[in-house]
Image: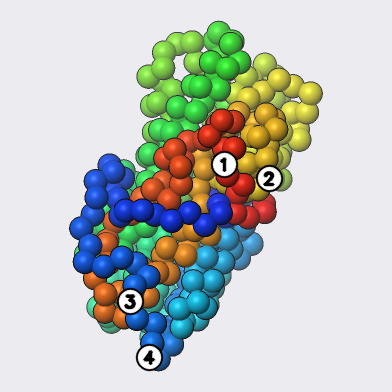
Amino acid sequence: MRRWGALTAAIGVLLLPTACSASGTATTSTSEPGTASATGAPKRIAFFGFAKANSFATATFTGVEQYAKAHNATAQFFDPNFDAQTQVRQIQDAITSKRFDVFIIQANDGNAVQLPVQAALAADIPVVAVFTPIGPRFDTAEPQLPGVVSLVDVPTDNGTKLGTLGIKACAATKTKPCRVAYLEGMKSLPLDNARTKAFKDTLKAAGPDIQLVADVEGGYTQQSGRTAMQDVLQAHPDVNVVIGSTQAIAGAEAVAEGKSIAFVGNGGSHQAVNAVKQSRWFGLYYVAPTTMGSKAAALGLDKARGASVPTTFAVTDLVPHGGAATFESLQELTGEYDE
């Protein structure tokens, strides 16, 4: 249950044509990421990911490391194993060591890392927030600490799009009322709480024909998904739509074998994309961690080398269709990692 994995790795490397905020507004920049000179002393990137055991985090690091190697830099993964306080200490220790020129932070808790991030910025270390917002707000892609470069997935946008996919899945099942189960990631995480509220608000606005009959912790592993789905089916054997992390949904699918259920996943692994293409799942909130990691490394290294870079990106700007994908829109994609 202590797995952040719904955050899985990414798609075939998609280029971001323009720097955009979550609202789609272009962000002013005096240079494009990747144009700063890679000559001179090699730069060192510290990557603070969710956990090495998490496929999404390792896929993000793959993008960071690949870009670093191609641009006169090295990268190191600091593994907190999903523990927010361990991650805070790792950032503090990295500042003290003075060994790194760039920090890329995939925060387990965006609130907890604020003080060490401020300390890093005060030490003139460029900081890129990747996937998780750094700060108390979960409804914006804008940096919440001055000086941070923000490349994040807006949790409320994620929840809203998951809800919209759930509504479409209900329409496809042609059931009234349509019974929906939500396998929330981790109820202890503020980010998951914000995403879940946006998801519930979206379903509620669709009217009484769509009913949320279960909201259980599904986690970010197949095992946690299997356990959650067993609980759901025991209480609601007639559930029509089930939504959760791609890892949890993979586990849920195994438990629900033989039942007619429309599944919606949150992530973008090879396996999840194939499940939609094979019509076993209805759709995905599709994210691209390897592409995201590469973009984060480009932004961080350019800033460390003196270039002026955009400060605001939404992760959904890196993928087609704003991340909300179904059978038709996934045909062009393959996924970037294995669960």
First along the sequence among labels 4 and 2: 4
Residue at image position (63%, 41%) is 273
Residue at the outermost bottom position: 41
First along the sequence among labels 2 and 1: 2
Which amino acid type corresponds to the residue marked 2 in the rendered image?
A: Gln
Which amino acid type corresponds to the residue marked 4 in the rendered image?
A: Gly
First along the sequence among labels 1 and 3: 3
From the viewer's perspective, tell me whether residue 213 is left or right of residue 294: right
The numbered mark at residue 40 is 4
SS at mark 1 in the image = loop
> Cα distance, mark 4 to mark 3?
11 Å
> Cα distance, mark 4 to mark 2?
41 Å
Q: How many marks?
A: 4
Residue at the outermost top position: 176
> Cα distance, mark 2 to mark 1?
15 Å
Residue at image position (43%, 56%) is 15
Which amino acid type corresponds to the residue marked 3 in the rendered image?
A: Ala
Q: Position of residue 305 (x, y in %)?
A: 31, 80
Q: Nearer the viewer, mark 1 or mark 4?
A: 1
Q: Which residue is mark 3?
A: 36
Q: Position of residue 254 (x, y in %)?
A: 76, 35
- Say how the picture is coloured: rainbow
